[in-house]
Image (cartoon, coloured by chain):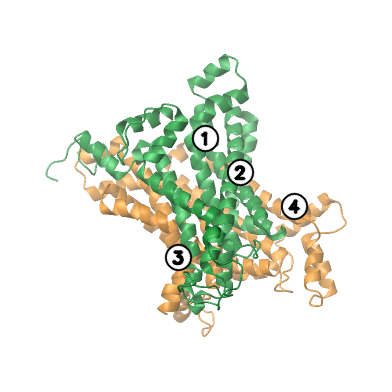
Amino acid sequence: MRHLLKNLGLYALAAWASLTLNFIIPRMMPGDPASAMFARFAGQLQPEAIEALRAAFGFTNEPLLQQYFTYLSHMFQGDLGISVAYFPASVTEVIGTGLGWTLLLSGTAVMISFALGSLLGVIATWRRGGWLDSTLPPLLSFLGAFPYFWLAMVVLYGLGYSLGAFPLRHAYSDMIAPSLSGEFIASVAEHMVLPATSIVVASLGGWMLGMRSTMVGVLAEDYISLANAKGLSQGRIMFHYAARNALLPNITGFGMAIGFVLSGSLLTEIVFSYPGQGYLLIQAVRNQDYPLMQGIFLTITLAVLGANLLVDILYVWLDPRTRAR
Amino acid sequence: MQVANQSVAQMGEAGGVKPVARRSPRTGLLWQLLGNRKASVGVGLVLFFIAMALFGPLLVSHDPGAFVGAPHEAPSAEFPLGTTGQGQDVLAQTVAGARTSLTVGFIVGLTVMVIGAIIGMTAGYFGGWVDSALSLLTNVFLIIPGMPMAVVIAAYLRPGPVTIGVVLVVTGWAWNARVLRSQMLALREKDFVSAALVSGEGHLRIIFREILPNMTSLLMSGFISATIYAIGAQVGLEFLGIGDVGVVTWGTNLYWASNNAALLTGAWWTVVPTGVCVALVGFALVLINFAIDEMTNPRLRTDRGWTRMLKLNKLEEGLSTPVVKRHGR
């Protein structure tokens, strides 16, 4: 419980730090983003828009501390300002359209990669020196050395463009209106195959190696020898005795991995024009849409913090030792 | 750590290394690295790419930025790796890209390692409120996702390799600091530190002369991980168009390839060479890191070394601590 409370404090602090970072960065930079944007969009923006932008940033003539509190209170009301690229839509609205897609894509990819990678790690370690153990680690670390988005490009070219087996872009077919119909869900799944595959391929190696190194340690424990001595079946020892305990450190890694995969999927989304946070982020960068950019950074950070918190709770639930303390 | 290194050396490594006679921890580690098969492949690859970055541009006939051919020309005798969507020589671009990308990668790796070491070691050595404050800072930076933060910071700064480097240092130091802090916590409890304290040595001297040499392998592997991170993240940021897209780097090569819709027109040769180079450098560095891990943690040694050790002890494969020998297998 203490462990959980301590981490809760850490997450709150991290959330505050990223909020504050968002406040400080534009103010430390030379010039005024609002004016810069206005100059860039000269003639396209209404004069009132610049005032709205300044207000959104909290760029006023008030003392810095007061600006900071105004900014914080806006944030807590969920008011992240107005998007420039999608003017006059608010940042919150724009992000709302992308968040679900990102969570769907990276959520699915992390789950598959975690389950598959850990399983491969268990099996490879169990047959130490076997063909799986000697081929998989180098192969998967080689694949993991490729940038996520580069693998995405290759998968897009090979399976999408050359073979024509999968759609090349977007999250669902333009021909179908979003609804809860079977047809729509099938289209979403079909569009998700390539981006998810590229993320899974890139991140599989990390899971497998993590699992492998903890399994090596667990297999040396006395209770494994005891289980062997009792004559339990190898499958039972492998999964119920060894893997169960070796999995715990990997679960802590799971929380961090969500952060990494979310970052990795940003680039993957861009390759596939998948309408999630990453795609919005690149639009924001290209259009110098600072409010949207910062809003996306904030939501991703909060998503990562939330995921870590969930993993912490899961960990306490899975590992009795953390509960006892 | 020194003890572990020596014991590994005495047992003999998978590649058939003879026990190393020299005892100094630094030379010991280097000698072992050169004897390890994984590490020598890794070091060889890294040296190849460094040579390519240094001398490659002198050997390639075309200027990487010049428009020398028709757009998206397939590989031919004149352009061994084809041309880009703007008619630039892909081979020249790949070779020239190595220079910027590797320079930024190694400098950032070194800086991250030094900053991580200073913060982590200070926290671990002094403990108390210093540790609490620095650990908190480290944990906060660890948990805030690096890539989106890098994008936001980089978007405000003037684009260019220096900006990218600064951003990568800011987002990359925390992991190293955490690893080195925990190592410092373990080492400062050792007898030799107490002995040094009692004999009246200063804190700085103890940290740098007594403790630091025992962290060589950890520092080295920290430097390598940081370099891997720096090269990967740099390529990613530049792919987003956040770097200076006028400079030829591996990241901007991929940016232009994607911008010119290379894959949708079938021009795979604009994408493949750069990606393979990035992956090979990353893989080579990972190999060196594996080798360092194996040397400091005998449990992780290669399978051949493992099976050999089992045989030496007359044990069967499959069980790591076979107290009871199973029959009929």
Q: Position of residue B208 (x, y in %)?
A: 57, 28
Q: Is residue A220 above or below residue A256?
A: above
Mark 3 → mark 2, Cα distance in angstroms: 31 Å
Q: Residue at x 28, y 47 (%)?
A: A128
Kind of residue sitting beneath label 4 = Ile
Mark 2 → mark 4, Cα distance in angstroms: 24 Å
Mark 1 → mark 3, Cα distance in angstroms: 34 Å
Contact flag, marks 3 and 2 (Cβ < 8 Å): no
Protein chain holding label 3 = A
- Tell me what hue chain B is rendered in: green
Task: Give whichever of B235, B316 is nearer the camera.
Answer: B235
Protein chain holding label 2 = B
Which mark is drawn over residue B182? 1
Query: Do the residues at pointers 1 and 2 share their chain?
Result: yes
Q: Is residue A189 above or below residue B167?
A: below
Kind of residue sitting beneath label 1 = Ser
Protein chain holding label 4 = A
- Going by the picture, which residue comes out furthest to the right? A61
Query: Image check: B91 left or right of A207?
Result: right
Count the numbered circles shown.
Answer: 4
Which mark is drawn over residue A198? 3
- Residue at the spot of label 4: A24
* Neighbour tally class for label 3: few under 14, some 14-19, many 20 plus, Cα within 10 Å: many
Query: Do the residues at pointers 1 and 4 share their chain?
Result: no
Q: Position of residue A247 (x, y in %)?
A: 39, 48
Which mark is drawn over residue B111? 2
Q: Nearer the viewer, mark 2 or mark 4?
A: 2
Kind of residue sitting beneath label 2 = Thr
* Neighbour tally class for label 4: few under 14, some 14-19, many 20 plus, Cα within 10 Å: few
Q: Is residue A83 visible?
A: yes
- Rendered image quadrant of residue B160: bottom right
